[in-house]
């Protein structure tokens, strides 16, 4: 398949389009059988307020996918602009132990690990998982959310970390 211009395959033009989709950077974490793992993700979105739910998408070849498939709970840590180094660590090819050595991580009873200084940490019970193409969509029912007072989301667009800023209010 090709793009409307016929100049490049739709896969490449779609990849280029998605580079233009700014998204809040998250670290999705899971703990299962005494092992914990997490990875940086932008394929995260709210799903419903009734019931409160969120979805995350992961490639079926990823290590997190295997652990999330076997787990009952996961946590979506929405990152603050202060969390760039932790984001880079969780997207690098290091071990889980090395990933969790960066940042301040905590884990309550029955919870997945959460980053204490994240913008928000959303604990979820896994309700459903749906395979689609190379990925699986995991739907989580929100159990709790911790929110940092200062709102400064870490975003990702066109291969770079970016900040968000309010536009000037229009008069009239």
Image (cartoon, rainbow, N blue to C red):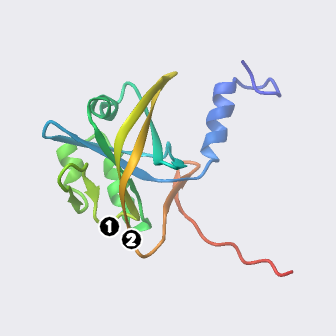
Q: Quadrant of the C terminus?
A: bottom right
Q: Would residue 120 be found to the left or right of residue 170 on screen?
A: left
Are there few (<14), some (14-19), or many (20+) residues within 10 Å of tag 1?
some
Q: Would residue 93 be found to the left or right of residue 14 on screen?
A: left
Where disc 1 sits, the SS reads loop
Residue 114 on image: x %, y % = 28, 56
Discs 1, 2 touching: Cβ within 8 Å: yes
Q: Would residue 1 be found to the left or right of residue 141 on screen?
A: right
Farthest front residue in view: 50
Between 89 and 64, the one lying in front of the other is 64
At 34% from the left and 59% from the top, the residue drawn is: 85
Residue 153 on image: x %, y % = 49, 64
* Residue highlighted by disc 1: 117
Farthest right residue in view: 172
Residue 115 on image: x %, y % = 29, 59
At 48% from the left and 48% from the top, the residue drawn is: 51
* Residue highlighted by disc 2: 148
Residue 3 quadrant: top right
Farthest top residue in view: 1
Depicted 62 relative to depicted 142: above or below: above
Residue 65 on image: x %, y % = 34, 31
**Foreground label between 1 and 2:** 2
Residue 30 quadrant: top left
Where disc 2 sits, the SS reads loop
At 81% from the left and 27% from the top, the residue drawn is: 4
Marks 1 and 2, Cα distance to the nearest angstrom?
7 Å
Q: Which mark is residue 158?
A: none
């Amino acid at each position: 398949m090709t793009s409307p211009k016929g100049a490049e395959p739709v896969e490449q033009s779609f990849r280029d389009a998605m580079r233009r989709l700014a998204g809040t950077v998250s670290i999705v974490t899971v703990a299962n059988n005494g092992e914990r793992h997490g990875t940086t993700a932008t394929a995260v979105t709210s799903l419903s307020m009734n019931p409160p739910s969120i979805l995350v998408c992961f490639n079926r070849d990823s290590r997190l996918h295997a652990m999330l498939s076997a787990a009952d709970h996961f946590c979506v840590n929405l990152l603050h602009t202060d969390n760039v180094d932790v984001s880079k660590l969780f997207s690098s090819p290091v071990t889980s132990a090395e990933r969790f050595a960066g940042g301040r991580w905590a884990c309550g009873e029955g919870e997945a690990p959460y980053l204490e200084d994240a913008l928000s940490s959303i604990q979820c019970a896994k309700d459903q998982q749906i395979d689609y193409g190379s990925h699986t969509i995991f739907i989580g029912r929100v159990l709790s959310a911790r929110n940092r007072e200062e709102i400064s989301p870490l975003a990702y667009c066109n291969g770079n970390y970016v900040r968000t800023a309010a536009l000037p209010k229009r008069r009239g």
